[in-house]
């Protein structure tokens, strides 16, 4: 019986990790125009804005800046939806 506990824990952890895979929640790429150029974002569900990330940024923009722009776009979508 004690040998089954680690196996059950491993199986349940693996199952839950698969359920939380961000790829299950991805949107089609979204383009956001900024003064520095267009940022292409991968947005997730409205509840998972912190997962939103840049998949393409202008040459002179950092990925971190692109990620912040994408998260802001995710929040904009979230707020727009809640206003309805």
Image (tube, grey):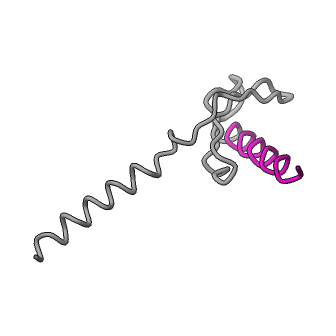
Residue pictured at 65% horizontal, 28% vertical: 29
Quarter occupied by residue 4: bottom left
> Where residue 8 sits: x, y (%)?
23, 65
| Residue 69 shown left or right of residue 26 in the figure | right
Q: Quadrant of the N terminus?
A: bottom left
Q: Nearer the viewer, residue 75 or 54?
A: 75
Quarter occupied by residue 63: top right
Residue pictured at 71% horizontal, 40% vertical: 70
| Residue 31 shown left or right of residue 24 in the figure | right
Instruction: Please identify the residue farthest to the bottom as the structure is shown.
Output: 2
Magenta stretch encompasses residue 14: no
10 shown above or below 40:
below
Magenta residues span 66-84
> Where residue 24 sits: x, y (%)?
51, 41
Residue pictured at 44% horizontal, 51% vertical: 19
Q: How many marks?
A: 0
Residue pictured at 77% horizontal, 41% vertical: 73
22 shown above or below 40:
below
> Where residue 27 sits: x, y (%)?
63, 34
């Amino acid at each position: 019986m004690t040998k089954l506990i680690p196996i059950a824990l491993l199986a349940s952890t693996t199952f839950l990790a698969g359920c939380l895979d961000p790829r299950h929640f991805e949107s089609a790429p979204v383009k956001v125009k900024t003064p520095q150029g267009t940022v292409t974002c991968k947005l997730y569900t409205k509840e998972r804005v912190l997962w939103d990330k840049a998949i393409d940024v202008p040459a002179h923009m950092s990925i971190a800046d692109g990620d912040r722009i994408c998260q802001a776009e995710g929040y904009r979508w979230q707020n727009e939806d809640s206003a309805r």
